[in-house]
Amino acid sequence: METAEQLKQIVKDKYSEIAEQDRELNASSCCGATCGCATIDSAIMADDYTQLQGYAADADLGLGCGLPTEHAHIKEGNTVVDLGSGAGNDAFVARSIVGEKGKVIGIDFTEKMIEKARINADKLGYNNVEFRQGDIEKMPLGGNIADVVVSNCVMNLVPNKQLAFSETHRILKPGGHFSISDIVLRGELPEGLKKNAEMYAGCVSGAIQEVDYLLAIKDAGFTNLQIQKEKKITIPDEILTNYLSQDEFSNYKSGAIGIYSITVYAEKPLEQKCAPGSGCC
């Protein structure tokens, strides 16, 4: 089994590669990580951003699994932090809502993504959108600075999700909230998918059970947790047969296991209650 640092390196290597590809190539693969399956429809994971205000085609690498900004209740003048900001897609949509008086900060683990996002921001002439290289488990931000946190198909790639949600709690202002789109599981994923590095970086094998995911959010000190949207992800047979035995494939197709994209909302209480690891005490 890979260590947390090895898993992080897998993600960094894969997303460095993705940063240098165009959207068409990324969209033909599972969540942007090339799986040798060029016939895959990009709708497997990603949702359509093209009609959203602030959409910038150069920033859309087809890597998401939802539209968190659509559900995040962002207001003009807010400070928004985008976790796993990639080439800037969600950050630029958020910027269109916060306006000139607001601020958007994108954090990404991959230097090449940060470079790409900064180039895109310069092209657009934005002076209130910035991108910082950093680890979501230890964010390069002070506490209590964000009104809203968004993230799109990223938390599932973080080895220590409990720590990532605790860090999210730390950077949010009291009364602030997040809206995060991510991949979760219902039922036990076959070992063949769990262990494969490409599938890990492709947003599937890094996912955990939905009940554990939601518990990590509650344990970080968040309240008013809601699932704002969900959809079942159908992985094509040509991907599954690469990683599963015939028996595993049959069991998977029986419907006992489900892979879901969910968009989750939760709030940091106005009154601080110190949760273990939340950084409030």
Image (cartoon, grey):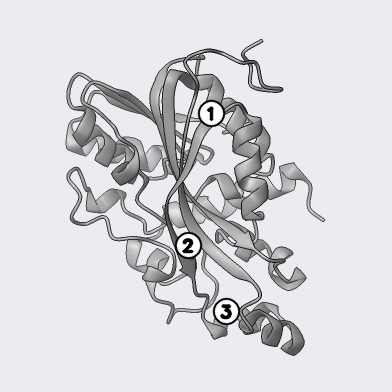
Mark toward the start of the polypeptide (3 vs 1):
1
Q: Label 3 to label 1, Cα distance in Å?
A: 33 Å
- Locate the N terminus by quadrant: bottom right
Percent x, y of residue 130: 34, 27
**219, 140: nearer the viewer:** 219
Q: Residue at x 36, y 43 (%)?
A: 116
Horizontal relation, residue 130 to residue 254: left or right: left
Secondary structure category for the residue under label 3: helix
Vertical side of 21 occupied by 232: above or below: below
**Residue at the spot of label 2:** 31
Mark toward the start of the polypeptide (2 vs 3):
2
Marks 1, 2: nearer the viewer: 1
Which residue type carries mark 2? Cys
**Residue at the spot of label 3:** 239
Q: Residues within 10 Å of mark 1 (few under 14, many from 20)?
A: many
Q: Label 2 to label 3, Cα distance in Å?
A: 12 Å
Q: Label 1 to label 2, Cα distance in Å?
A: 23 Å
Percent x, y of residue 135: 58, 33
**Residue at the spot of label 1:** 168
Secondary structure category for the residue under label 1: helix
Percent x, y of residue 279: 64, 16
Which residue type carries mark 1? Thr
Vertical side of 259 occupied by 50: above or below: above
Q: Residue at x 72, y 66 (%)?
A: 188
Horizontal relation, residue 14 to residue 189: left or right: left
Percent x, y of residue 57: 23, 53
Do labels 2 and 3 touch, CB within 8 Å? no
Mark toward the start of the polypeptide (1 vs 2):
2
Residue lying at the far top of the rendered structure: 281
Vertical side of 278 occupied by 51: above or below: below
Which residue type carries mark 3? Ile
